[in-house]
Image (spheres, rainbow, N blue to C red):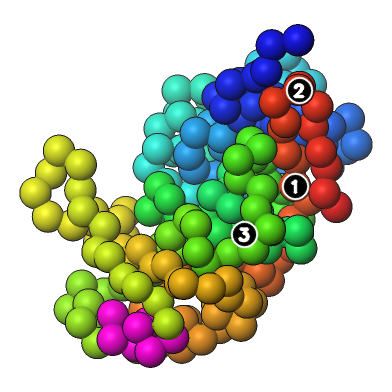
């Protein structure tokens, strides 16, 4: 059997997750669902739209984590709301998204697409978080391979960098592609990408980084442990609960 490509794994993980959640009744008509950002989340958004089109699901209310996802929902006919809308009331039944890294305890690094703040707002206000990922995202530890994104106030770049360095991080300001200057998030902020020489404790580091004045949010997600669907090259899907 031919090994699945990374993109094929992403699609498989997303479709398997949505199909499983619909079958288990965890994605249901009338629900409030958070929809994430990125190349693995987009197939999940599309699969939710399939179920709406065939009338398996109705009256689904989505809260999205980026302009990318909002545009996709508009194109696919999924109505989009804010957490502040009265009909949403500040909480969600479930959120589904991708991740940049997943460790054995289902801690996450997210924010490769610079949407970490909105992702965390949505996903920390969901009763259940579901993550879809390809096999390359499963790692034994965090901090040394995929750079942790830290969203910062631009005026605080230097003091925040110094504070992160005191925590052992090496920081790089994320630069735009086909744009002069730094990446600017949907919230008007900048991103520092951080790496350590040795693995770090994600939960402890999430709290320490968030305490730095000038940090808006960091990309460790440890406080709402997800169910994770990881697609493998052989076409199987591991479910970590």
Residue at screen point 42% across, 82% down: 168
**Residue 238 as seen in the image, left or right of residue 6:** right
Tell us which disc is closer to us: 1 or 2: 2
**Residue 35 as seen in the image, left or right of residue 112:** right
Q: Which residue is mark 2?
A: 234
First in residue order: circle 1 vs circle 3? 3
Q: Which residues make up the magenta segment?
A: 160-167
Please tell me how many numbered marks the rendered image carries: 3
Badge 1 crowding class, 10 Å Cα cut-off, few under 14, some 14 to 19, many 20 or more, is: many
Q: Quadrant of the N terminus?
A: top right
In this view, the residue farthest toward the top is: 1
Inter-mark Cα distance, 1 to 3:
10 Å
Relative to 183, say whether 238 is above or below. Answer: above
Residue 25: horizontal and vertical position, in percent? 88, 37
Q: Which residue is mark 1?
A: 228
Badge 2 crowding class, 10 Å Cα cut-off, few under 14, some 14 to 19, many 20 or more, is: few
Q: Which residue is mark 3?
A: 108
Tell us which disc is closer to us: 3 or 2: 2
């Amino acid at each position: 059997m031919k090994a699945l490509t990374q993109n094929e794994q992403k699609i498989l993980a997303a479709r398997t997750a949505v199909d499983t959640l619909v079958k288990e009744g965890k994605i249901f008509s009338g629900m409030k669902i958070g929809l994430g950002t990125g190349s693995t989340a987009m197939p999940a958004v599309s699969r939710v739209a399939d179920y709406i089109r065939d009338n398996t699901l109705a009256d689904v209310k989505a809260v999205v984590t980026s302009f990318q996802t909002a545009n996709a929902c508009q194109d696919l006919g999924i109505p989009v709301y804010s957490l502040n809308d009265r009909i949403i009331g500040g909480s969600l039944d479930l959120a589904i998204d991708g991740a940049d890294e997943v460790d054995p305890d289902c801690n996450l690094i997210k924010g490769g697409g610079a949407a970490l703040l909105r992702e965390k707002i949505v996903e920390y206000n969901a009763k259940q978080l579901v993550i879809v990922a390809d096999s390359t995202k499963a790692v034994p530890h965090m901090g040394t391979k995929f750079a942790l994104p830290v969203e910062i106030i631009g005026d605080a770049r230097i003091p925040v960098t110094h504070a992160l360095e005191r925590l052992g991080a090496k920081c790089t300001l994320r630069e735009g592609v086909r744009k002069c200057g730094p990446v600017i998030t949907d919230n008007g902020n900048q991103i520092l990408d951080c790496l350590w020489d040795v693995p770090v404790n994600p939960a402890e580091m999430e709290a320490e980084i968030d305490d730095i004045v000038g940090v808006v949010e960091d990309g460790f997600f440890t406080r709402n442990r997800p169910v994770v669907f990881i697609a493998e090259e052989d076409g199987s899907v591991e479910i970590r609960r």
